[in-house]
C-alpha cells in the first residue's frame, strides 16, 4: 500500500518539476534570433574579413589572365577573352561564375593579380531556379584591363584598383599556408663524419 502512494507522490512531484522548468521560460528573455528581419545588425556586417562569401568581380580591373578560371578545381568559372583581330585588344566577352557549384574555397581569388575577383560577406543566395545562381559579370564585351607601369591615374579605375590590390594582398597573406621551415644546411664533411 505504501508503495502505491509513493508512486503517486513521485508522479505528482515529477509533473511539478517539469512544469516549473516550463513556466520559468515565461519570464526569461528569449534567446531566439528572428533572422533575417529582426536582428539589430546585418549578419553580413558582423563577419570577419576572411569570410568567404559569394564571389564578386570588378570587371573593370580584370586583365583577362584566366588565372582564376584555371585555379578553380570544379570549373565554376567560365571566361571568354579573345583578342580583337583589328585592334589587338583583349576583350572580355564572358565572365560567369556558377555559385550553385562553388564551394567557396578561395582558390580563384588567391592568384588574381588585381583583386578583381574577390569574396564578399554575402551568403544569401537561395532562390527557386538554378539559373539565378549563374552570375554573369559581362553583359556586353568590354576591353580587358591593362595594368600601367606606374600608379593608375584614371579617377574611376584608381580607387577600384586600390581596393582590389589591398584585397589581393590581404587575402593572399590571410590564406597562404606557411612554408615549412628550411632544414639547416649540413656542415661540410658532416655526412662523411657520420659514416
Ligand atoms: S571559390 Fe573555389 S569553387 Fe568557388 S569559384 Fe573559386 S575556386 Fe571555384
Ligand atoms: S578575375 Fe583576376 S584572375 Fe580572373 S581573369 Fe580577371 S584578372 Fe585574371
Image (spheres, helix red, strand yellow):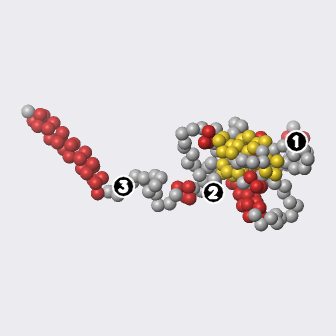
Residue corresponding to mark 3: 30
Residue 103 spot, x, y in % from top left: 63, 41
Could you say which disc has been placed on residue 191 in the image?
1
On the rendered structure, is 20 left or right of 110? Answer: left
Q: Which quarter of the figure is the N terminus placed in?
A: top left
Looking at this view, name the residue that lies furthest to the left.
Answer: 1
**Residue at 77% over, 55% down:** 61
Measure the C-alpha gap from mark 3 to mark 2: 30 Å
Quadrant hosting residue 18: top left
Measure the C-alpha gap from mark 1 to mark 3: 70 Å
**Residue at 40% over, 52% down:** 32
- Label 3–label 2 contact, CB within 8 A: no
**Front label number (1 vs 2):** 2
Residue 72 seen from this side: no
**Residue at 87% over, 45% down:** 83
On the rendered structure, is 139 left or right of 44? Answer: right
**Residue at 11% over, 37% down:** 5
Is label 2 in a helix, a strand or a loop? loop
Residue corresponding to mark 2: 49
Residue sitting nearer the eye, 166 or 76? 76
Q: Earlier in the sequence, mark 3 or mark 2?
A: 3
Q: Earlier in the sequence, mark 1 or mark 2?
A: 2
**Front label number (1 vs 3):** 3
Residue 34 spot, x, y in % from top left: 42, 53
Amino acid at each position: 500500500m505504501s508503495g502505491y502512494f509513493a508512486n503517486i507522490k513521485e508522479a505528482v512531484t515529477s509533473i511539478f518539476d517539469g512544469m516549473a522548468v516550463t513556466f520559468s521560460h515565461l519570464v526569461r528573455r528569449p534567446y531566439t534570433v528572428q533572422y533575417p528581419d529582426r536582428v539589430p545588425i546585418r549578419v553580413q556586417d558582423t563577419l570577419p574579413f576572411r569570410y568567404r562569401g559569394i564571389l564578386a568581380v570588378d570587371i573593370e580591373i580584370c586583365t583577362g589572365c584566366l588565372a582564376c578560371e584555371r585555379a578553380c578545381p570544379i570549373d565554376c568559372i567560365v571566361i571568354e577573352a579573345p583578342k580583337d583581330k583589328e585592334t589587338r585588344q583583349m576583350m572580355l566577352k564572358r565572365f560567369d561564375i556558377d555559385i550553385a557549384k562553388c564551394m567557396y574555397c578561395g582558390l580563384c581569388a588567391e592568384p588574381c593579380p588585381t583583386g578583381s575577383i574577390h569574396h564578399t560577406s554575402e551568403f544569401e543566395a537561395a532562390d527557386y531556379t538554378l539559373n539565378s545562381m549563374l552570375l554573369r559579370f559581362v553583359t556586353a564585351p568590354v576591353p580587358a584591363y591593362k595594368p600601367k607601369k606606374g600608379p593608375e591615374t584614371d579617377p574611376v579605375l584608381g580607387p577600384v584598383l586600390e581596393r582590389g590590390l589591398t584585397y589581393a594582398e590581404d587575402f593572399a597573406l590571410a590564406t597562404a599556408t606557411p612554408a615549412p621551415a628550411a632544414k639547416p644546411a649540413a656542415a661540410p664533411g658532416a655526412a662523411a663524419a657520420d659514416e
